[in-house]
Image: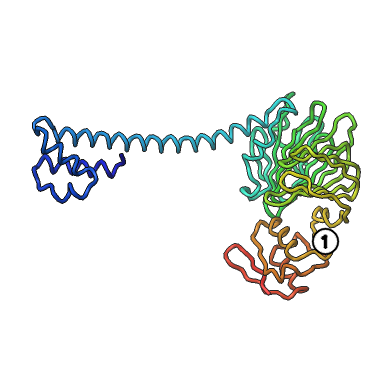
Amino acid sequence: MNLKEYFRLAGLFGKLNSQEKLGDDFTTTPEGETLRFFWESCKQEKIDASSIIEKTRLKIRKDVTRRRRNYFLITSASIAASILICISTIYFLNQTTNDNIDFQTIAKGMDSQTVDEVTLITAKEQLNLDEDAFIKYSKEGKVAVNSQVLKEEEEKVKDEQEYNQLLVPPGKRARIELSDGTRLIVNSQSKVIYPRRFKGDIRKIYAQGEVFLEVAHDKKHPFIVESEDFNLRVLGTKFNISNYKGSATNIVLVEGAVEVTDRNEKKAQLAPRDLLNIAGGAITGQKQVDVAEYISWVDGIMLLNGNDLSQIIQKLSIYYGISIQCDPFVGSEKVYGKLDLKDDIDEVIECIRQTLPFTIEKRDTSIYLNK
């Protein structure tokens, strides 16, 4: 019985107790005839209407109290979940073994789209860094940003496996040199998780977004890149990973050799200039490409070799963190040349417009390219 029914029945009992005219109300309700029968056929002195009404009201108050308590528990659970994410991040960043680290849990805790600056998260603090920051780790695990050693790192580094996380917001990039000498260039809207210094038999990191890696050669300690859709294993090589959320994953090998395993345990061996496509966690294709087109962003430019405009604006949307849409007829147009990603988005769009006939419309935070 819900709250509305309680009030309605309480009112009926009130009328019974006051001896008011009962006909209309009792004939228009499903329970009316039954209540009327008991009232008229039974001895009224045995029925305490006021007691029934009071018990009904107590029942209503208990239901309301229970709902409020449930709401409080739900709200408390939400707050507790937020706190748990923070605690879990600190806990996992301080894991003691390289094999036990849960990268997926840490990655869900922070999003590169929620930060405005290049953000470095250690087990002790969160730091905002300059654009194009260069973060370098020593063999001992000490870290310097743009050649400046962090104060907290001047203390003796503990003999444990501590992980750091780097978040790069839209329109910015960052560079990292890991403790083994491996170098990473991290593109816009990307994140990486890695140890301050490598220990154990393997070197493992996590990457999401777009990252160019130059892995330091170490035959005894394979290098593994873990992601949501794949694991990549190398000894020493240069390659580019692009695995933004909502987009297909592609891996381009510049030099060396890598082995990629998808979520279905299917493996693929890549040779230099190979492009591997992964969609929905499954390998879908492999072919030879011009690697310059896929790694030109490292130098702050985008090479255009007859790409559809729709493909170009998809990349620009990710890089600048802004919604860009275009008319299908415009989107099928081929574009050649190169774009300077150091310019702001308005200048980049204007540069494209000089070679293609379309109009630019801005609405709120979106850009529309119309024929």
Task: Tell me if residue 238 comes above or below residue 90 in the rendering.
Answer: below
Please say whether residue 241 is visible from this viewpoint: yes
Going by the numbered disc 1, the residue's amino acid type is Leu
| Residue drawn at x 64%, y 33% as measured from the top left | 124
| Residue drawn at x 82%, y 44% as measured from the top left | 213
Quadrant where the C terminus is found in the figure: bottom right
Residue 356 % position (x, y): 75, 73
Q: Quadrant of residue 64?
A: top left
Please say whether residue 156 is visible from this viewpoint: no
Q: Quadrant of residue 292?
A: bottom right
> Judging from the image, what secondary structure is the residue with disc 1 in?
strand
Residue 151 % position (x, y): 70, 35
Colouring scheme applied when the structure was drawn: rainbow
**95 or 151: nearer the viewer:** 95
| Residue drawn at x 13%, y 49% as measured from the top left | 23
Residue 228 % position (x, y): 71, 41
